[in-house]
């Protein structure tokens, strides 16, 4: 075994320089794992990661292949297929992903003003876009263009129209993914439930447009 004292000067130099680098990596990992707000935020996600996310992403991928093949077949037959996971009652509380990092104005955070929130937002927005259904995207855009919040009966009517395109799920699961990820909000007004797009939803749509991503998602 070669002793470091007898090694060439360049080996000794690399070894000495490597010590602070190793300590920096170790300290950075500990800070990220136990103290970073990014770590707290990522571990709090329930609807864009975990088994529900994987199931939804897998079905979405199969649906895209079906659309590309020209079949247009729907594979969303399970009760959780369109919600990206379980319902809010099963999770215990509504989970907000994009809203955890969005700007109050409804636009995505600026990398110069707050780089942490900027990357948090883009991380969540990208994953939501990858699993959102076309009918859910259409509803989000419809709420954005609406001059006022829409009543539940109006949303249900929109859901029935969208279901003709091959979407198979319950109405609860249809809106659950959007609501649980903070893109839309439901409010009781005079005994009637009304839905409206949130600042998070507007920021998400702005992200899609700025990145020039197709708004016509499969199914």
Image (cartoon, rainbow, N blue to C red):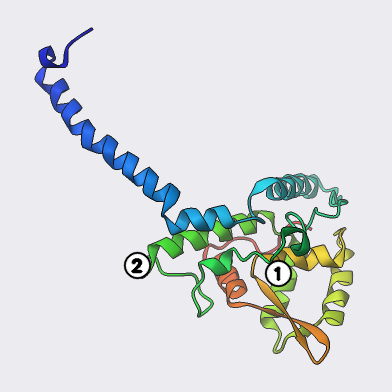
Q: Residue at x 56, y 63 (%)?
A: 212
So how many labels did they put on this image?
A: 2
x and y percent of residue 89 in the render?
77, 63
Task: Please name the residue shown 75% across and 56% down the image.
Answer: 218
Closer to the eye: label 2 or 1: 1
Q: Residue at x 84, y 81 (%)?
A: 154
Q: Position of residue 27 (x, y in %)?
A: 32, 44
Identify the image quadrant of the N terminus.
top left
Q: Nearer the viewer, residue 142 or 178?
A: 178
Can you say which quadrant of the picture contains the C terminus? bottom right
Return the residue nearer the eye: 34 or 11: 34
> Looking at the image, is 204 positioned above or below residue 196?
above
- Quarter of the figure with residue 140: bottom right
Which residue is labeled 1 in the image? 179
Give the x, y percent position of residue 197.
66, 78
Query: Could you tell me which secondary element the residue under label 2 belongs to?
Result: loop
Residue 130 versus residue 5 in the image, above or below: below
Asked whether 88 or 120 is in front, the reply is 88
**Do the residues under discs 2 and 1 have CB atoms within 8 angstroms?**
no
Q: Is residue 115 visible?
A: yes
Report, in whole angstroms, how far the alpha carbon at label 2 lies from the one at label 1.
29 Å
Please state the horizontal and vertical placement of residue 159, each as a whole percent of the image.
Answer: 85, 70
Which structural element holds mark 1? helix
Residue lying farthest top?
1
Q: For the residue carrying disc 2, how many other residues have a C-alpha within 10 Å: few (<14), some (14-19), or many (20+)?
A: few
Q: Which mark is residue 85?
A: none
149 relative to 182 in the view: left or right: right
Which numbered marker is on residue 112? 2
């Amino acid at each position: 075994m070669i002793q470091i004292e007898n090694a060439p000067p360049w080996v000794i130099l690399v070894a000495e320089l490597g010590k602070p680098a190793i300590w920096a990596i170790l300290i950075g990992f500990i800070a990220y794992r136990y103290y970073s707000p990014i770590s707290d935020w990522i571990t709090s996600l329930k609807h864009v990661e975990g088994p529900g996310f994987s199931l939804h992403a897998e079905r979405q991928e199969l649906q895209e292949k079906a659309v590309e093949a020209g079949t247009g077949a729907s594979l969303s037959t399970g009760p959780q297929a369109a919600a990206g996971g379980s319902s809010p009652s099963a999770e215990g509380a509504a989970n907000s992903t994009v809203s955890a990092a969005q700007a109050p104005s409804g636009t995505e955070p600026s990398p110069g003003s707050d780089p942490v929130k900027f990357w948090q937002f883009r991380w969540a927005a990208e994953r939501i876009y990858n699993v959102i259904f076309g009918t859910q995207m259409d509803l989000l855009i419809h709420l954005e263009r609406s001059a006022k919040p829409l009543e539940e009966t109006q949303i249900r009517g929109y859901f029935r129209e969208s279901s003709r395109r091959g979407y198979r799920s319950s109405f609860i699961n249809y809106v659950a993914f959007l609501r649980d990820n903070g893109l839309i909000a439901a409010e009781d007004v005079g005994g009637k439930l009304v839905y409206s797009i949130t600042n998070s939803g507007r920021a998400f749509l702005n992200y899609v447009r700025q990145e020039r991503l197709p708004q016509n998602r499969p199914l």
